[in-house]
Image: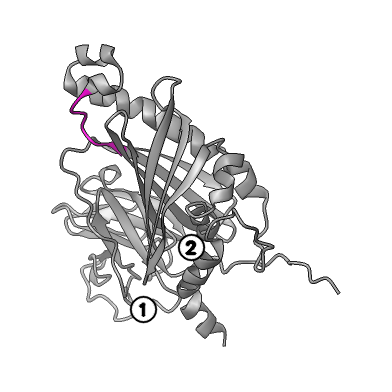
Amino acid sequence: MISYPTPKKLFPFPTGWYVLLRADELHKKQLITKKFAGQDVVAFRTEAGKVAVVSAYCPHMGAHFGHGGDVQGETIRCPFHYFCFDTEGTCTKTGYDTKPPAKAVLKTYTIREKNGFILIWNHVSDEAPTWEVPDTHNENWSEILSTDFLLNSHPQETTENSVDVGHFSVVHKYVDVQELSELKAEGPYLNAKYAFSRDGFVGKTKIRAHIDIHVHGLGYSFVEVLIPKMGLLTRQYVFPCPVEEGKINLKIGMSVKKIEDAGKINFMLKLFPKNLLNKIILKSAFKGYVNDVSQDFDVWQNKVYMDNPALAKGDGPIGKYRQWAKQFYESLENELN
């Protein structure tokens, strides 16, 4: 009897770090409401510059901080009765200058402000992080351009693209795809390196690109893309963040290593001032990157997850990736058992 692969539903919110928003989106004394893992949360930055992410609902009587609340000094203030809470969730003041009730404790989330982004930790039992996203060295790199897409998908599905060699040529029309080194998986980190030829980000000339993929959990990835012929190095960010079951906010971004020899890209570019040159290259490359990623959207939003896929030679190390990804569901499975 033939055994057919069957669709399976992934757990909606795997353990890990996720990018909630850019750090420069959140100014001092500002608060922003976001949806994360099925919950409304509020990110705020205090007058001194400290960032916190908390439950959107006041533990006093349930008012939503994002609808009329504000930041007072080092606290967030509820719009309903002016109860104030610090970045640790402690009620520091009521609206009547009476003693805060012991039960008035605001849920806070573990966060990091790192690499220009505000990251939030997800764990089904609210356990502390067991690993961190590393610092990236941004000296001599451009600003990061980014944009967001709300998609019907899952972080494991979008991150799986990093090892899905087969789709490179089918979906993205890359040619001469080559594996430069075997997939490496160490704890929550995964690394893969490939090369391929494609149409250029700048101009229409066919170019050879080398990509070095760095995956830290299912929510934080970046790819360093080197085009040796042009001396061009870009860093492409991929941040799928679970919004609610079956939906993610996909934030993608790019920065460019500052150009030293513009003539390798196009001799006419040598006439541009360096600051302007880097902005032009970044804008053009980012436009190409957004186009590449958007080619996957229709597939992502309409596919099902095959737990036992009928893999073929040429697919790439998808099986190894799936084994690696299981670690981000262990705590979820323990909760259900």
State the SS at label 2: loop
**Can residue 279 be seen at all in this image of the molecule?**
yes
Q: Where does label 2 land, which residue?
A: 37
Q: Where does label 1 land, which residue?
A: 127
30 left or right of 184? left
State the SS at label 1: loop
Label 2: few (<14), some (14–19) or many (≥20) C-alpha neighbours in 10 Å: some
Residue extending furthest toward the left: 48
Out of 325 and 11, give the one closest to the viewer: 325
- Classify 296 as above or below 318: above
**Residue at point 28% right, 58% down?**
77
x and y percentages locating residue 212 in the rendered image: 36, 49
**Residue 234 quadrant:** top left
The amino acid sitting under disc 1 is Glu
306 left or right of 284? right
x and y percentages locating residue 227 in the rendered image: 34, 34
Out of 203 and 275, give the one closest to the viewer: 203
- Does the magenta stretch mainly form a helix, a strand or a loop? loop
**Can residue 64 be seen at all in this image of the molecule?**
no
Label 2 to label 1, Cα distance in Å? 15 Å
The amino acid sitting under disc 2 is Ala
Q: In the rendered structure, which segment of residues is drawn in magenta?
A: 255-261
**Residue at point 54% right, 81% down?**
333
x and y percentages locating residue 332 in the rendered image: 51, 77
184 left or right of 264? right
- Classify 135 as above or below 87: above
Label 1: few (<14), some (14–19) or many (≥20) C-alpha neighbours in 10 Å: few
